[in-house]
Image (cartoon, grey):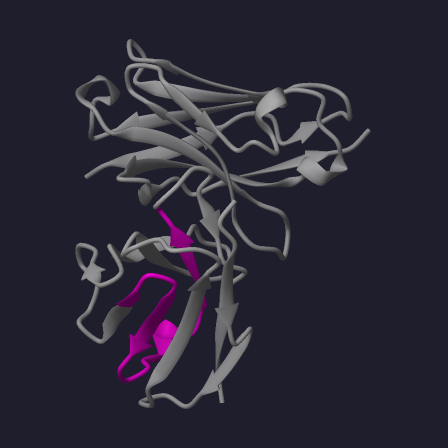
């Protein structure tokens, strides 16, 4: 059973960098599939952030691309999201997911990140 | 970007009745369409992919149809656990995009 778990600071100051990690269990990232990030502002809908293949190739939402880095650490079986220069508009629940053919098959439980001074 | 439009925004249905949710893509996406269910405080759950294929463990009362730009999710007989928000997502092209959601509430 594939399981994903997000972790990282719940509070980030404006203009700083948001850093989250998604720990994967029940499957080895190096074996394949794509791994993605999705977010949901409070009370709103879902927004795709970006997806990476296990080998490292990445696809980013153009609206966020200049501020994003998604990376993988196969030795720890986790992947990470870094988003720079955050503002209050980046306040959201952030989900990680395992993707297959650009469909989010398995999701983490989500972690709320609030951007505030 | 492909814009996904869901209707209605809210659907009021009695338990045991059928619910029909619509999703429209702003351009042709073949059958590259997924549906998700989200309950309050929970992560979304994949219901349907490739427009009509149920994900593992999804009950048969959930069915998807459509191709091109028009898609439908049908819940044949609503159970209490089906009251939730439903999102469609196109998987045809980057960037991946979601619809705004349909809330299915108890009538």
- Could you say where residue B101 lies in the image, as x and y percent from the top left? 51, 63
- Any magenta on residue A91? no
Q: Quadrant of residue B39?
A: bottom left
Instruction: Kindly identify the residue that appears in the image at 35 percent across and 46 percent down.
Output: B91
- Could you say where residue A28 lies in the image, as x and y percent from the top left? 21, 22
- From where the camera sits, is residue A62 visible? yes
Instruction: Point out the image quarter for the N terminus of chain A.
Output: top left
Q: Which residues are magenta?
A: B66-91
Task: Identify whether B76 is placed above or below A115.
Answer: below
| Residue toward you, A12 or B18 | B18
Does residue B2 appear left or right of residue A99 in this picture?
right
- Could you say where residue A43 lies in the image, as x and y percent from the top left? 63, 57
Instruction: Kindly identify the residue that appears in the image at 64 percent across and 51 percent down.
Output: A42
- From where the camera sits, is residue A95 visible? no
- Any magenta on residue B70? yes
- Could you say where residue A113 lies in the image, as x and y percent from the top left? 62, 35
Instruction: Kindly identify the residue that appears in the image at 78 percent across and 26 percent down.
Output: A14
Instruction: Kindly identify the residue that appears in the image at 32 percent across and 44 percent down.
Output: A103
Task: Identify whether B48 is placed above or below A92.
Answer: below
Task: Identify whether B46 is placed above or below B83.
Answer: above
């Amino acid at each position: 059973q594939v399981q994903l778990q997000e972790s990282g600071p719940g509070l980030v100051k404006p203009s700083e960098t948001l850093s989250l990690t998604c720990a994967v269990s029940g499957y080895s990232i190096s074996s394949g599939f794509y791994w993605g990030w999705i977010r949901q502002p409070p009370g709103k809908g879902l927004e795709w952030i970006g997806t990476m293949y296990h080998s490292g190739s990445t696809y980013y939402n153009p609206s966020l691309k200049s501020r994003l880095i998604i990376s993988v650490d196969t030795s720890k079986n986790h992947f990470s999201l870094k988003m720079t220069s955050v503002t209050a508009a980046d306040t959201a629940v952030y989900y990680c997911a395992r993707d297959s053919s650009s469909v989010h098959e398995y999701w983490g439980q989500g972690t709320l990140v609030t951007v505030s001074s | 970007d492909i814009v996904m439009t869901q209707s209605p925004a809210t659907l009021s249905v009695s338990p045991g009745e059928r619910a029909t949710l619509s999703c429209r893509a702003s351009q042709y996406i073949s059958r590259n369409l997924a549906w998700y269910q989200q309950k309050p405080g929970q992560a979304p759950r994949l219901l349907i992919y490739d427009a009509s294929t149920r994900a593992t463990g999804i009950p048969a009362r959930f069915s998807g149809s459509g191709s091109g730009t028009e898609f439908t999710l049908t819940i044949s007989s609503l159970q209490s656990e089906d009251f939730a928000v439903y999102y469609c997502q196109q998987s045809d092209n980057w960037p991946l995009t979601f619809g705004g959601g349909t809330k299915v509430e108890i009538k």
